[in-house]
Image (cartoon, helix red, strand yellow):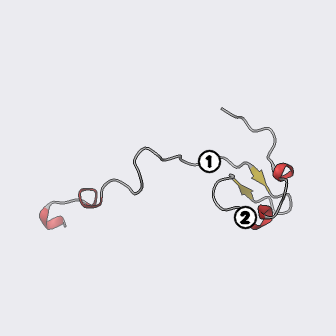
Amino acid sequence: MAAYGYTPQDIFGRGRGRPGLSRGASTAKYRDPASSATWSGRGRAPNWIRDARNRDRFLIRNQVTA
């Protein structure tokens, strides 16, 4: 690759996925009172909140929303 003057970006592109859809890091929305583990609410739910019917009791209060 270097012998021909190519960079990894030339061959593989700048990143994976569709361009412009990056969300970046998200803040924690839920907290486990027993272990203080947090979850943003995105993706697969962790075991400590997975079976909860009402997730309101796990919400982190005093969050600043935009």
Residue 10 at x, y = what percent?
Answer: 23, 56
> Does residue 60 sit above or below 49 in this rendering?
above
Image label count? 2
- Label drawn at residue 6: none
Identified at 62% across, 47% down, the residue is 26
Residue 17 at x, y = what percent?
Answer: 42, 55
Please state which of the two labelled residues, at mark 2 or mark 1, is closer to the viewer. 2
Identified at 83% across, 60% down, the residue is 52
Decide if residue 50 is on the left or right side of residue 12.
Answer: right
Residue receiving disc 2 = 46
Q: Are marks 2 and 1 in contact (CB under 8 Å)?
A: no
Mark 1 belongs to which amino acid? Ser
> Does residue 20 sit above or below 36 in this rendering?
above
Residue extending farthest left: 4
Comparing 38 with 54, the one in front is 54
Identified at 65% across, 32% down, the residue is 66
> Does residue 53 sit above or below 19 in this rendering?
below
> Mark 2 or mark 1: which comes first in sequence?
1
Q: Residues within 10 Å of mark 1 (few under 14, many from 20)?
A: few
Q: Residues within 10 Å of mark 2 (few under 14, many from 20)?
A: few
Decide if residue 40 is on the left or right side of residue 56.
Answer: left
Residue 27 at x, y = what percent?
Answer: 66, 46
SS of the residue under disc 1? loop
Residue 2 at x, y = what percent?
Answer: 18, 65
Mark 2 belongs to which amino acid? Pro
Identified at 84% across, 48% down, the residue is 56
SS of the residue under disc 2? loop
Residue receiving disc 1 = 26
Residue extending farthest top: 66
| Mark 2–mark 1 distance (CA, rounded to whole Å) | 16 Å
Comparing 26 with 17, the one in front is 17
